[in-house]
């Protein structure tokens, strides 16, 4: 099982990337080219991205509303910095059309799994990868809807 988790930043920021297979490796990257190069080398079974992979026409998507119902804070996807991030993620997903790419939210995973990891690009990338592993093990749940976009979160008891 090969999983890549990406804590995507805007192009000016630092992106965390985690490769999870026999061992865990993390990277701090800047460009889409660097991200794609690692993905093509690893050939993962799944790629998880901490960023909206779709944008609503207005307000929040159903996925964000579902997170709010679970008492999990969200950033509005149309907030200027989030919109810019989502546009980068959508472009990146298009470039990765030969791979399974899903949207995840490490803050939600941290809350659901009751993990005390400190927030950092590397740790968030690790949480993204963990959700990808759980997805492959069928231990996740999709919230939102297919039309507006779904966020994959761990199942809870």
Image (cartoon, helix red, strand yellow):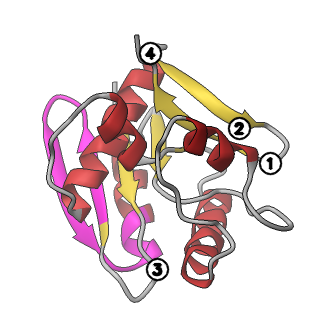
Residue 4 image offset from top left, x and y in percent? 36, 45
Q: Quadrant of residue 76?
A: bottom right
Q: Residue at x 39, y 65 (%)?
A: 35
Above/below status of 104 relative to 75: above
Q: Is residue 122 part of the magenta span, yes or no?
A: no
Q: Kindly report the distance in space between the C-alpha atoms of the residues bearing marks 4 and 2.
A: 17 Å
Q: Kindly report the distance in space between the C-alpha atoms of the residues bearing marks 4 and 3.
A: 30 Å
Would you say residue 99 is visible in this rendering? no
Image quarter hosting the N terminus: top left
Q: Kindly report the distance in space between the C-alpha atoms of the residues bearing marks 2 and 3.
A: 24 Å
- Magenta region, residue range: 16-35
CB-based contact (under 8 Å), mark 1 and mark 4: no
Residue 59 image offset from top left, x and y in percent? 77, 65
CB-based contact (under 8 Å), mark 1 and mark 3: no
Marking on residue 25 = none
Above/below status of 120 relative to 41: below
Q: Secondary structure at mark 3?
A: loop
Q: Which residue is mark 1?
A: 148
Would you say residue 129 is visible in this rendering? yes
Q: Which residue is mark 4?
A: 139
Q: Which residue is mark 3?
A: 10
Q: Is residue 28 part of the magenta span, yes or no?
A: yes
Q: Which sits earlier in the primary sequence, circle 4 or circle 3?
A: 3
Q: Which residue is mark 2?
A: 144
Counting other residues with Cα less than 10 Å from the Cα at mark 1, is it few (<14), some (14-19), or many (20 or more)? some
From the image, state whether disc 2 or disc 3 is nearer to you: 2
Q: Quadrant of residue 99?
A: top right
CB-based contact (under 8 Å), mark 2 and mark 1: yes
Residue 127 image offset from top left, x and y in percent? 29, 42
Q: Which sits earlier in the primary sequence, circle 2 or circle 3?
A: 3
Q: Residue at x 83, y 68 (%)?
A: 58
């Amino acid at each position: 099982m090969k999983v890549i988790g990406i804590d995507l930043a805007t192009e000016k920021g630092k992106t965390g990337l985690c490769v999870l297979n026999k061992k865990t490796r993390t990277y701090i990257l800047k460009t889409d080219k660097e991200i794609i190069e690692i993905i093509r080398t690893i050939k993962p079974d799944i790629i998880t991205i901490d960023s909206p992979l779709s944008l609503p026409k207005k307000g929040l998507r159903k996925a964000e509303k579902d997170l709010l119902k679970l008492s999990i804070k969200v950033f509005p996807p149309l907030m200027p910095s989030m919109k810019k991030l989502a546009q980068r993620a959508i472009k990146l997903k298009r470039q990765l059309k030969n791979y399974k790419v899903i949207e995840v939210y490490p803050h939600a995973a941290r809350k659901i799994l009751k993990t005390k990891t400190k927030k950092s690009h590397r740790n968030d990338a690790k949480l993204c990868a963990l959700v990808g592993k759980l997805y492959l093990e069928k231990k996740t749940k999709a919230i939102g809807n297919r039309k507006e976009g779904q966020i994959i979160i761990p199942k809870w008891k």
